[in-house]
Image: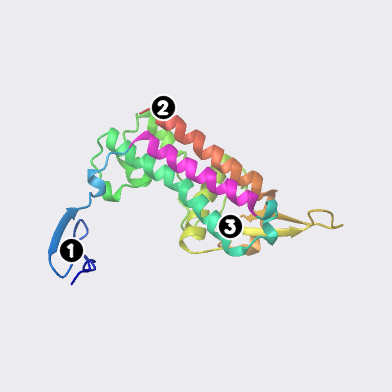
Amino acid sequence: MGSNPTPFLLALSVNANLHWFCHATREKCVLHIYSRPSLSEMVISKAMVNDRLCFAERRVTELLALNGGNLASAEPSWRQQLVQEFFFHLVGATEILASLVDQERRLGIDPDHVSLTKVLKKVKVSDPIRQQLASLYAPVGGRPVPSIPYTDEAYIFRVRNYRHQVCHRGANPFHFKAQLGGGPSPTTTHLLLDPRDPNRGGSDRPARDEMQYMLDLVKKKCTSALSLL
């Protein structure tokens, strides 16, 4: 007819790991089949842990620069997206670390279902890495935020609680305090001590300082653990 036939693609997932797609024109049809590797086929590396820490650092940097640093007047959806991604990647680094320990210590946990708690149950008590991993974990379900919320242990608890409440449930973690007397920054931004109970109020410390401390704390603990692998 003097014109090239228009190709089209038809794609289908046969199962979670096997996929096929058909590249076709009116004249021919070519069937392609490919497999997608599962987590059990992946090799976890130290770089993957550090990558997640870098992702968290990028997100908190973007968050704190939002609207010139005035988070109280920033676009709420942008503010929420960035804080969600910060806590997602920060806790994600500890989960990748758990997968790496499972791999390197040959613990035999199903790679598709590795968790920090499962690794802690299987790693030897005498293994020095166990203490490092334990310091990155805190059970939060049904438990209150520690009465003194500014210790390292309390910050780990809060990090994991924020990840669950902010990322999984969409809670707003911010608390804005109006300063008497006005001035160039009449409103300061803080983190709610517990998004599950906003009535408890916000932290006495600025959100900027706390999120940076959380990042540095998790990074330090992950680095110590990686040095033992």
Magenta stretch bounds: 45-66
- Disc with the residue nearer the chain's start (1 vs 2): 1
Confirm whether residue 201 shows in the render.
no
State the residue at coordinates (53%, 54%).
162
- Which badge, 3 or 1, is on the more N-terminal residue? 1
The percent position of residue 76, horizontal first and vertical second, equals 61, 64
Q: Give me the disc on residue 22.
A: 1
Foreground: disc 1 or disc 2 = 1
> Is residue 77 visible to us here?
yes
51 within the magenta span: yes
Query: Which three-letter amino acid code belongs to the residue tagged 2?
Result: Ser
Residue bearing mark 3: 194
For numbered disc 2, what is the local secondary structure?
A: loop
Farthest bottom residue?
A: 1
Q: Residues within 10 Å of mark 2 (few under 14, many from 20)?
A: few
**How far separated are the C-alphas under marks 1 and 2?**
48 Å
Residue at x-position 31% and y-position 39%: 44
Mark 3 → mark 2, Cα distance in angstroms: 33 Å
Q: Is residue 182 left or right of residue 170?
A: right
Between 42 and 159, the one nearer to me in the picture: 42
Q: On the rendered image, what quadrant is the C terminus found in?
A: top left
Q: Which residue is mark 2?
A: 227
Q: Residue at x 60, y 41 (%)?
A: 213
Residues at marks 1 and 2 touching, judged by CB atoms closer than 8 Å: no
When asked about the image quadrant of residue 72, the answer is bottom right
